[in-house]
Image: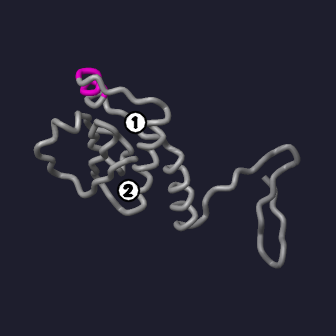
């Protein structure tokens, strides 16, 4: 690595053919880049949720998953941690922070739901 002096400051410079990757320099930039990466992540289904969906004959298309992903994004922007999502004739409990569907059930099976801080009906 070589250095150059510009305006009285020592600045590292790459050798020809060597590319330097820019790393986030501040907390704000790091948090901003993490938030961008987080929004690109899609919602995952836990093994428990997959099992429940199979047993209850609940299936989701790519379009359905996109709508659920958008709902999780919305709840995340509002600061939710655990949410109940109603979609078509199914209900999903989701960890908003982990972007994971924890469990699934038919909406007719809902009697008591605890430990959630948000609810969204997806249209």
Q: What residue appears at the point 54 percent right and 60 percent down from the top-left corner?
A: 30
Q: Can you tell which quarter of the image residue 91 is in? A: top left
Question: Label 2 crowding class (10 Å Cα cut-off): few <14, some 14-19, many 20+?
Answer: many
Dot 1 falls on a residue whose secondary structure is: strand
Query: Callout 2: helix, strand or loop?
Result: helix
Q: Residue at x 32, y 58 (%)?
A: 80
Residue that sits furthest to the right in the current view? 16
- Residue 103 x, y percent position in the rendering: 25, 36
95 vs 123, nearest the viewer: 123
- The residue that mark 2 highlights is 75
Q: Position of residue 50 (x, y in %)?
A: 31, 26
Between 15 and 59, the one lying in front of the other is 59
Q: With respect to residue 26, does 101 lie above or below?
A: above
Q: Left or right: 3 with respect to 77?
A: right
Verify whether residue 94 appears in magenta. no
Question: Within 10 Å of the Cα at label 1, are there few (<14), some (14-19), or many (20+) other Cα atoms?
Answer: some
- Number of numbered discs on residues: 2
Label 2 vs label 1: CA separation? Answer: 16 Å
Disc ID at residue 115: none
| Residue shown at 84% from the left, 65% from the top | 4
* Residue found at x 31% / y 27%: 58
Left or right of residue 107: residue 36: right
Tell me: 40 left or right of 61: right
Q: Are marks 2 and 1 in contact (CB under 8 Å)?
A: no
Position of residue 19 in the picture relative to residue 52 (left or right):
right
Please identify the residue farthest to the left as the structure is shown. 111
Highlighted range, magenta:
50-55
**Closer to the observer: label 2 or label 1?**
2
- Magenta: main secondary structure equals helix
- x and y percentages locating residue 115 in the rendered image: 17, 52
Mark 1 lies on residue: 44
The residue sitting at the bottom extreme is 8
């Amino acid at each position: 690595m070589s250095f150059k002096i510009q305006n009285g400051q020592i600045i590292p410079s790459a050798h020809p053919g060597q590319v330097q990757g820019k790393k986030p320099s501040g907390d704000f930039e790091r948090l901003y880049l993490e938030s961008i990466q987080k929004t690109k992540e899609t919602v995952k289904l836990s093994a428990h949720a997959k099992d429940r969906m199979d047993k209850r004959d609940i299936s989701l298309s790519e379009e359905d998953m996109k709508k659920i992903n958008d709902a999780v994004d919305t709840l995340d922007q509002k600061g939710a941690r655990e949410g109940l999502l109603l979609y078509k004739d199914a209900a999903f409990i989701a960890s908003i922070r982990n972007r994971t569907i924890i469990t699934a059930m038919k909406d007719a099976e809902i009697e008591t739901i605890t430990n959630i801080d948000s609810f969204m009906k997806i249209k």
